[in-house]
């Protein structure tokens, strides 16, 4: 059905957020609810997602939690269809769920590649496939995909993660050009360092292929001045309201984006030097655990 209504920014909008139980997804869900959205939090960690949804409702917001693995396309499609039947619209889908596998590529098994591609890339594809045609039919909608600064620059030490995030950036910018004439917006979020569970061993479903004491990892992350997830979410939503294509938060990380755009060879050299320095600081010999 065609609709004369436009997207709601953000009051009374309907929003799906994957990976909504913790980290960036949780923060986005909380801030969207504060802005007046009805939020559907999608996560495999259903008890945690229900706790977040309950806290949102206790604060006067509208939220529900749904247990779905984003690699399950039929489940994502059912969720979108049920949401639209119930609310009459879908303003936003945040394809945010993701994992990290830490270690050099020689340590990977094929199962590691399959796992991270399925979650970080296929999970985004599934969300798009479930929501895009619905948004075209209603005449509005905004698809927001979470990539990473790893999608804007080389990432030695996390090659598989970097591969998937480069793919999400390319997918998002390409789809944005296609979708605009159909009334659908597409943005990609490229976080720098954000203080979330993914900083601790890759998160709940991530994996560390090497033994690195957490206190050493913490010291390395602190040098990057991680931003709080809720402040991150506030800044991101301001950019989404303005329909920005590529959203880099914190803003100072744009320096690395510009370096790699202007001189890819220099960007690769910087990444190599940083990786070598990191190995030295960690006293790291890359062996699979």
Image: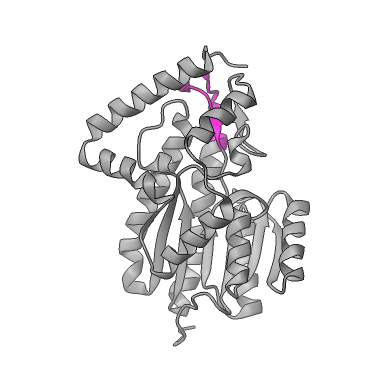
Q: Residue at x 65, y 38 (%)?
A: 205
Q: Quadrant of the C terminus?
A: top right
Q: Residue at x 49, y 75 (%)?
A: 9
Q: Residue at x 63, y 21 (%)?
A: 213
Residue 286 visible in the displayed image: yes
Instruction: Specify whether 250 is left or right of 229.
Output: left
Return the x and y of residue 136 as percentages of the image width and height.
43, 73
Above/below status of 153 relative to 213 = below
Return the x and y of residue 221 as percentages of the image width and height.
53, 34
The answer to if 111 sits in the magenta stretch is yes
Residue 81 visible in the displayed image: no
Figure quadrant of residue 60: bottom right
Q: Residue at x 43, y 78 (%)?
A: 139
Instruction: Specify whether 83 is left or right of 191.
Output: right
Considering depth in this image, is 190 or 120 the residue closer to the camera?
190
Residues shaded magenta: 100-115
Instruction: Specify whether 74 is left or right of 250.
Output: right
Considering depth in this image, is 193 or 182 the residue closer to the camera?
193
Q: Residue furthest bottom?
A: 4
The answer to if 63 sits in the magenta stretch is no
Q: Give the color scheme: rainbow, by chain, secondary structure or one colour.
A: one colour
Above/below status of 147 relative to 33 = above
């Amino acid at each position: 059905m065609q609709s004369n209504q436009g997207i709601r920014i953000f009051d009374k909008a309907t929003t799906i957020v994957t990976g909504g139980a913790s980290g960036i997804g949780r923060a986005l869900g909380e801030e969207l609810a504060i802005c007046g959205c009805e939020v559907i939090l999608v996560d495999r960690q259903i008890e945690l997602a229900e706790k977040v949804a309950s806290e949102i409702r206790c604060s006067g917001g509208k939220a529900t939690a749904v247990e779905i693995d984003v690699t399950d396309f039929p489940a994502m499609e059912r969720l979108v269809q049920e949401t639209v039947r119930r609310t009459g619209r879908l303003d936003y889908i945040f394809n945010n769920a993701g994992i990290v596998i830490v270690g050099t590529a020689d340590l990977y098994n094929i199962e590691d590649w399959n796992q991270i591609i399925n979650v970080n890339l296929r999970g985004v594809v599934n969300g798009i496939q479930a929501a895009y045609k619905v948004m075209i039919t209603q005449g509005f909608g905004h698809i927001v995909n979470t990539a990473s600064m790893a999608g804007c620059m080389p990432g030695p030490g996390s090659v598989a993660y970097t591969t998937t995030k480069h793919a999400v950036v390319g997918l998002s910018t390409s789809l944005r050009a296609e979708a605009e004439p159909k009334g659908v917006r597409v943005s990609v979020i490229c976080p720098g360092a954000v203080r979330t569970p993914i900083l601790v061993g890759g998160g709940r479903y991530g994996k560390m292929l090497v033994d690195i004491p957490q206190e050493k990892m913490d010291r390395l992350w602190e040098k990057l001045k991680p931003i709080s997830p809720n402040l991150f979410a506030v800044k991101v939503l301001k950019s989404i309201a303005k329909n920005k294509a590529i959203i880099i938060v914190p803003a100072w990380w744009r320096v690395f984006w510009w370096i790699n755009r202007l001189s890819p060879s220099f960007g690769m050299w910087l990444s190599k030097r940083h990786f070598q320095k990191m190995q030295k600081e960690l006293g790291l010999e890359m062996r699979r655990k």
